[in-house]
Image (tube, helix red, strand yellow):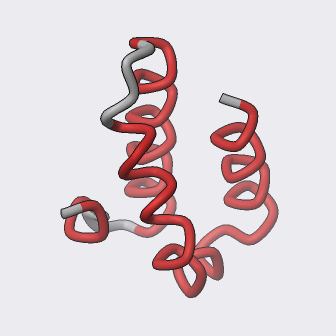
Amino acid sequence: MRVISIISCFLDKKGENYLAVLPDSAPLLAEALEDDDAKVEKECRKLIKKMEETFGHSVESYFE
C-alpha cells in the first residue's frame, strides 16, 4: 500500500500533469487491483477515483 500512497502524493503535487506518466504506473496499479488483500484493492480503487476527478475523465482504459 505504500506505493499507492506515493503515487497519490505524486498526483497531489503534479495534478493533471501526472497523466503523462500514468502509463508507466498503470501496470503496478492493475496488479494492485487484483491483490489478495482487500485493503490494497480498496486503496487502489480510491486512487483511481481520485485520478479520474483530477483528470476529468475515466482512466479505466489504462488498466485493461
Position of 16 with respect to 59 (left or right) is right
Q: Quadrant of the C terminus?
A: bottom left
Q: Nearer the viewer, residue 57 or 31?
A: 31
Q: Is residue 17 left or right of residue 61?
A: right
Q: Residue at 49% x, 13% y: name it.
A: 39
The residue depicted at 64 percent of the width and 41 percent of the height is 4
Hey, which quadrant is residue 37 in on the image?
A: top left
- Residue 52 located left or right of residue 23: left
Query: Foreground residue, 62 or 56?
Result: 62
Q: Quadrant of the N terminus?
A: top right
Percent of width and height locating residue 20: 56, 87
Does residue 9 lie above or below 33 as drawn? below
Identity of the residue drawn at 74% across and 71% down: 14
Is residue 38 left or right of 15 when viewed as pictured? left
For the residue pair 61 and 34, the one nearer the viewer reads as: 34
Report the residue that reaches farthest toward the top: 38
Is residue 4 placed above or below 38 in the rendered structure?
below
Query: To which quarter of the image does residue 62 belong?
Result: bottom left
Q: Position of residue 63 (x, y in %)?
A: 28, 61
- Residue 55, percent across and down? 45, 69
